Amino acid sequence: MKFNFLTFVRRNRKAKDKISKREVYVFLSCLGISIIIWGLIKFDKLYYGSIEFPIVYTNIPDNKLLINYPDSVLTLNLQSQGFDFFSDKYLSGDQAIYINIGDLKFEKVNGVYKSFLLTSQISSNISRQLSLSNKLISISPDTLSFVFESMKIKSVAVILPDLDLDYEKQYQQYGSITFKPDSVRVYGPASVIEKIDFVSTDKIELKKLKNNQELSMKIISPINNNKLRFSENEIQISIPVSKYTEGSIELPIITIDSLSEFKIKTYPDKVLVTYLVALNDFKRVNVDMFQLGVYYKSDELSANKTLKVEILHQPPFVEIVKIDPERVEYIIGKRHIIN
């Protein structure tokens, strides 16, 4: 049987690898057991330390507004065994302390209402919230101070914001721009509310419009005060847009005079009116919806050889862009002769 040196080396290397891995496993196991034993010894000891918890204030009186900045964090000084202390400090997550201030007694001083709360009076409640049992030694700060102002409610108008609208060719606003709500309730300190009569939004700038626009715009307070609240934070604005087309119609001229025995006759007695109308309303337009006329008085006739054609009535959904001619000549004569 031939001796193969390479095979011999490979077999011995595998054996050594197995021994090395076995040794590593044994070492890691011993290390882990040592750490556990050390941890048990340490955790069995009594520890003293402090832990900070955020505060959430509840049941703020509806008719009052908190205007100062009371403490937002409580520092709890604890005494507990190592494992409990570690759990309270590092495993409590985002747990907060809830403090009810709805039953505070107030003292009115210089137009505001002041009150305070001793944290020692709520220590048992805090212990129950956080399941601290007998671990709690003291709380810092020892006093929480509160300053309130009377809350006032006022309804104010919403003012349509400054609009900068640009339309595509042949497109225009179709009807009225609407927004809702048209008023909101403002909540805040009485001293501030009295100065507010309206609210608005940022300026609106829109380009190349050819479709209806529905916008949500944030309400802006006319006074920069973070104590103000609104019943609505946004208003909904509707901008109707439609494509327009041009139309024309020939209309007779009506004469309106202050003369009794004389009558005016215009030349021509009809004019051509050019108008813009939305495509949706184009078929609605007819002659009876328009009325054009000229005004004259006896003391003006000699001074003016022509009279301006005035629009007496037009449908609200059309825009007259041209009257041809804009001024007309006239003759004046006895009514029986002119007729």
Image: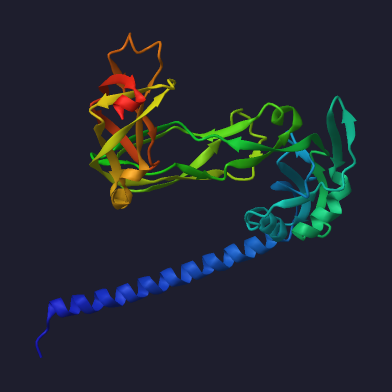
* Res 153 → quadrant: top right
In the rendered structure, the answer to whether residue 252 lies left or right of residue 95 reads left
In the rendered structure, the answer to whether residue 284 lies left or right of residue 161 reads left
Residue at 80% across / 42% down in the picture? Answer: 63
In the rendered structure, the answer to whether residue 40 lies left or right of residue 127 reads left
Q: Is residue 132 at least partly visible in the picture?
A: no
Q: Is residue 241 at least partly visible in the picture?
A: yes
Q: Nearer the viewer, residue 151 or 247?
A: 247
**Please, is residue 196 above or below residue 229 in the view?**
above
Spot occupied by residue 152 in the image (x, y as percentages of width and height): 75, 37
- Split into 4 quadrants, where in the image is the C terminus? top left
Residue at 87% across / 48% down in the picture? Answer: 103
* Res 254 → quadrant: top left
Number of labels in the image equals 0
**Please, is residue 326 above or below residue 215 in the view?**
above
Residue at 74% across / 43% down in the picture? Answer: 75
The residue lying furthest to the left in this view is 2
In the rendered structure, the answer to whether residue 251 lies left or right of residue 184 reads left
Spot occupied by residue 134 in the image (x, y as percentages of width and height): 84, 57
Spot occupied by residue 88 in the image (x, y as percentages of width and height): 69, 56
Q: How is this picture coloured?
A: rainbow
The residue lying furthest to the front in this view is 336
Residue at 63% across / 58% down in the picture? Answer: 91
- Split into 4 quadrants, where in the image is the N terminus? bottom left
Spot occupied by residue 67 in the image (x, y as percentages of width and height): 74, 33
Q: Nearer the viewer, residue 14 or 145?
A: 145
The residue lying furthest to the top in this view is 303
Q: Nearer the viewer, residue 30 or 259?
A: 259
